[in-house]
Image: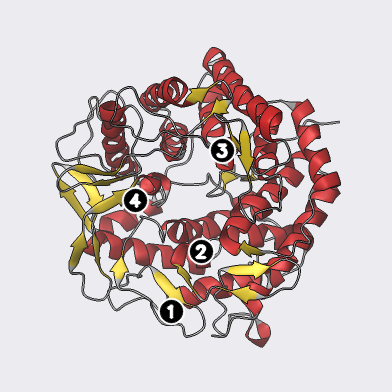
Amino acid sequence: MSGSGAGGQEDLPVMINNSLAARTTRRGMLYALAAAGALTAGGGSGGTRRAAADLRPGAVRAARAARAVPIATAEVLPDPEKAREIRAEFVHAWEGYKRLAWGHDEVLPVSGGHREFFAKGHPMGLSIVEALDTHYIMGLDSEVELCADWITDRLDVDVDADFQVFETTIRLVGGLLSGYLATGRRSLLDRCVDLTDRLLPAFTKSPTGMPYRYVNLRTGRVSGATLPVAEIGTNILEFGLLSELTGDSRYWRAAKRAVRAVVQRRSSLGLLATSLNVESGQWADRQGSAVDPPVDSFYEYLWGAWVMFRDEECRDWFAMFDDALRKHQAERVGGLLWFKHVDFRTGALLNRHQSSLAVAILPVGGDNALAADYYRSWTAVLDKYAVIPEAIDYARPAVLNARNELRPEYANCAFQLFWQTGDAFYRTTAWRYFENLRKYHRVPGGYTVVADVTRRPMPKGDHCPAYVFAENFKWLYLIFSGTPRFDYAHGYLSTEGKVLRGLRRPAV
């Protein structure tokens, strides 16, 4: 599996040092999960109902070629009152973490406890790393300094424990990168380099180039040979940016080689299954689950590599998979668009399950009609349950997993669609999401998960995932604030909500 560069290695994209001239927003278009066949969302996309999106590959390519350009922020007036309310709720969640779990990975806001995310007994201050660029976006400068100081003084990545490569990349590597971009502190970039160097054995020790699932940060020992596609390919944005910032191409080459290895193992239908053995290179299953976990962000990062680094190969791979997914997995039930799970080799139906994580994963480069269809479907789910369940079966229809783990994907979609179109419908529905977030997830110690969205009163759990500090409130704040600290026209955020492009720092 030789690369395209000299000596059989992947070269850094030619635009790596001048990518600022050719950027666009994180997702040109958002796939959103449909609700249930019996559900309808009033009002269509904005005030008018749009025609069903054309799923034919030719029409898709034409839409992608005419990709919509995000509207200028000056064309849409901010709503400072709503932005202040969102900011206040983020501060409430953050103060709960500071009071109950400072320095630990995650807070248990109901019991007042805490837990570590990566390895028991090894706190990494995950919520601190996740929150840093959100503090910056919201103008909470004293908290920015507090977080950056803790990372500089306390974060130790020399840990004798197995860390999951995927989660470490999108959370810690991504958070340190965005923290560096927000603050300019070299110590954060140095810590990021140290951490990523400790992750590299997962790639370099693999005979296929696809990373092992775990790596011991101290010893470099790797483990976990079978892992989901998303975990193999969701690293090219963070690794590519690190190569751009340091001039060290090792990170980009490792990430690109892993992506290429997956693409080469697609079926004759152009579909991917769910999990691969990175030593043998063989598929561990036959289920093509499209935009659902655990393959979701693999597709997202193909498009992201094009948007951030102008990698034409990743763009073309995305288009190939996009066409295959539409041809073999897309279907409409009750007028709503879904992706059925199929045998990736034959296309035979396996099930019609869908996950709420799929709502913001697959961008299609400007096909606003398709994105509006998906968003209306998810709005119907929001209207029916007030809080979106983790998973549904769209054919029955039925809720498969009634929990809500404080997922941010609906707010993510609202942000992208609003700043693509300027349609106030997306602000209206985002505000409804926020009001329900505040009503059902808020506790005195911050924000917590919900145990069953179908019951009233809605029972709460006892856990605030660290990604809440990176995503939910950030997406909502960006919709309403119009903050000058973010470049809406050219900004780009990772799958974990880290701002990898577009942070604006005040002139000194």
Badge 1 element: loop
Outermost residue, top side:
81
Badge 4 element: helix
Q: CA distance from mark 2 to mark 1?
A: 16 Å
Q: Quadrant of the N terminus?
A: bottom right
Mark 2 or 3, nearer chain start? 2
Image point (19%, 31%), residue name: 40
Nearer the camera: disc 1 or disc 3: 1
Kind of residue sitting beneath label 3: Ala
Nearer the camera: disc 2 or disc 1: 2
Mark 4 or 3, nearer chain start? 4
Return the mark for residue 37.
none
Q: Which residue is mark 2?
A: 231
Q: CA distance from mark 4 to mark 3?
A: 19 Å
Q: x, y (%) of residue 149?
A: 83, 39
Q: CA distance from mark 1 to mark 3?
A: 34 Å
**Residue 10 seen in render:** no
Return the mark for residue 63.
4
Nearer the camera: disc 2 or disc 3: 2
Q: CA distance from mark 2 to mark 3?
A: 29 Å
Mark 2 or 1, nearer chain start? 2
Q: Which residue is mark 3?
A: 489
Return the mark for residue 264.
1
Q: x, y (%) of residue 97?
A: 65, 31
Asked if the residue at tag 4 contacts the one at tag 1, i.e. Cβ–Cβ closer than 8 Å, the answer is no
